[in-house]
Image (cartoon, rainbow, N blue to C red):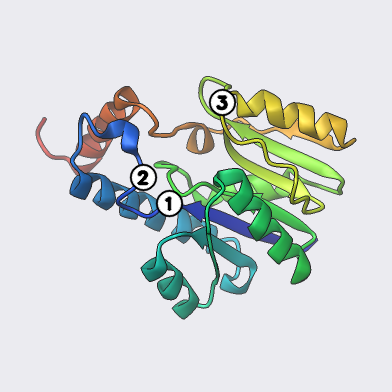
């Protein structure tokens, strides 16, 4: 099955606004750039650049991704679900038979997590949902066939995606992996991430 990766990315200076009480704009931009770099690296361990789509409103990032051989689509507004619909439709038109959506802000995701997400699809029609730690949001998703109107990201998106898969008669698998469950949407999650990074570096607390 020809599966494509889709990575939606906010402009780096616009992302992680809920961390504004902890980090200034420049620090948030640096964090978002670092997180995206990790997600892109592990994605390209599984997918060829020609089977990866980045969708963003950042013109510099669009040019950079195209220069690296990835497909880059301009997010013209309408929110995350509209951006994913655009990228899914594009991938399907270019031969994709499945898509794997990987948000750009997963701080501990690994190449094995990406491979597990894709492998769990099996034969379609199918949907694999990787929830966040609270099992309220959706942190990654794989879908076969590519269905542009499927996405329900937003509040309680885990249950919303389960309902969408059921309504469309898709076999559904829930994939629980720490690298896909851990995100940085709250100050507490960021503090935990910062402590883990400090410990990993061997620097004194």
* Earlier-in-chain disc, 2 versus 3: 2
In space, the residues marked 2 and 3 are separated at their CA atoms by 17 Å
Say which residue label 1 marks.
10
Left or right, residue 150 beside residue 33: right
Q: Residues within 10 Å of mark 3 (few under 14, many from 20)?
A: few
Residue 110 x %, y %: 48, 48
Q: In what element is the residue under mark 2?
A: loop
Left or right, residue 116 beside residue 189: right
Residue at the spot x=60%, y=23% of the render? 156
Left or right, residue 100 beside residue 137: right
In space, the residues marked 1 and 2 are separated at their CA atoms by 6 Å
* Earlier-in-chain disc, 3 versus 1: 1
Q: Quadrant of the N terminus?
A: bottom right
The label shown at residue 15 is 2
Quadrant hosting residue 51:
bottom right
Residue 160 x %, y %: 69, 27
Say which residue label 3 marks.
155
User: Foreground: 77 or 122?
Assistant: 77
Q: In what element is the residue under mark 1?
A: loop
Asked if 78 appears above or below 165 in the picture, the reply is below
Residue 49 x %, y %: 56, 71
Do callouts 3 and 1 mark residues in contact (Cβ within 8 Å)? Answer: no
* Earlier-in-chain disc, 1 versus 2: 1
In space, the residues marked 3 and 1 are separated at their CA atoms by 18 Å
Residue 120 x %, y %: 73, 43
Do callouts 1 and 2 mark residues in contact (Cβ within 8 Å)? Answer: yes
Q: Quadrant of the C terminus?
A: top left
């Amino acid at each position: 099955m020809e599966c494509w990766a889709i990575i939606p990315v906010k402009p780096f200076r616009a992302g992680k606004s809920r961390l504004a009480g902890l980090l200034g704009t420049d620090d948030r931009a640096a964090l978002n750039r670092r997180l995206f770099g990790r997600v892109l690296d592990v994605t390209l361990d599984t997918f060829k650049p020609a089977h990866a789509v980045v969708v963003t409103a950042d013109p510099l990032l669009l040019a950079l991704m195209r220069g690296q051989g990835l497909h880059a689509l301009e997010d013209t507004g309408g929110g995350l679900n509209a951006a994913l619909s655009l990228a899914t439709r594009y991938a399907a038109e270019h031969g994709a038979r499945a898509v794997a959506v990987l948000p750009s802000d997963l701080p501990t995701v690994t190449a094995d997590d990406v491979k597990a997400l894709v492998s769990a699809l099996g034969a379609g029609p199918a949907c694999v949902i990787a929830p966040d730690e609270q099992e309220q949001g959706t942190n990654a998703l794989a879908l076969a066939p590519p269905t542009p109107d499927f996405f329900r990201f937003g509040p309680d998106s885990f249950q919303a995606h389960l309902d969408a898969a059921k309504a469309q008669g898709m076999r559904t698998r829930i994939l629980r992996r720490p690298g896909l469950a851990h995100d940085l949407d709250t100050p507490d999650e960021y503090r935990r991430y910062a402590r883990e990074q400090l410990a990993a570096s061997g620097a004194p607390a």
